[in-house]
Amino acid sequence: MIDREPGQAQRRASTQPAPTATNGGAGFKPAPTVDTTGGCPDAAGDRWAPLEDLISRDLFKAEVKAWAQRIGVNPREVHLRPMRRKWGSCSTSGRLTFNEELLAAPPEIRRRVIVEELLHLKVPNHGKLFKALLKSYLEMG
């Protein structure tokens, strides 16, 4: 499970650190859902980002499937839904749930969240083995 910072949505983007693969996206404020004007607000919420920055649900699930094959796991279900405090979660039954705001997240943030949740199918905690596997998979990119 990857937790988001409480109250993250209320802060302005200028006060947030730049998202990186090493900080798990801390400071990344995802864009809200797309409206009918044909764009999407950026992290500051006051300008519109191009729709090309968003990926489809099908493309996201294909990315999860590709990483699952690479890691050697088989999730029973993969879901996207709104989540207030987490980027993703993994159930003991093999169900992965991801925050739909990841569709607007940078690729390195998506990759980290996907790999972390898939690794929980092998290692259910955040111990040394989990961290070593996470580091090795993220380095092979």
Image (tube, grey):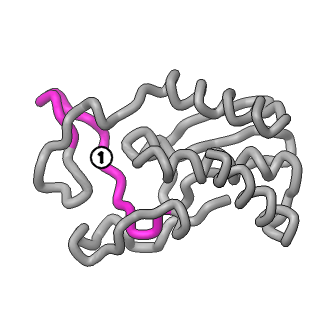
Instruction: Judge left or right: residue 136 versus residue 43.
Output: right
How busy is the neighbourhood of tag 1: few (under 14 within 10 Å), some, or many (20 plus)? some
Residue ID at (74%, 48%): 90
Query: Which quarter of the rendered picture does the N terminus lie within?
Result: bottom right
Q: Which residues are magenta?
A: 25-40
Most distant residue in the front direction: 140
Closer to the camera, 89 or 69? Answer: 69
**What is the secondary structure assignment of the residue under circle 1?**
loop
Quarter holding residue 55: top left
Location of residue 73 in the rendering, given as x and y in whole percent from the top left corner: 84, 36
Location of residue 99 in the rendering, given as x and y in whole percent from the top left corner: 52, 46
Query: Which quarter of the rendered picture does the C terminus lie within?
Result: top right
What's the magenta bit mostly, secondary-structure-wise? loop
Against 72, is 141 above or below?
A: below
Instruction: Judge left or right: residue 126 versus residue 80.
Output: right
Residue ID at (76%, 34%): 70
Residue 82 visible: no
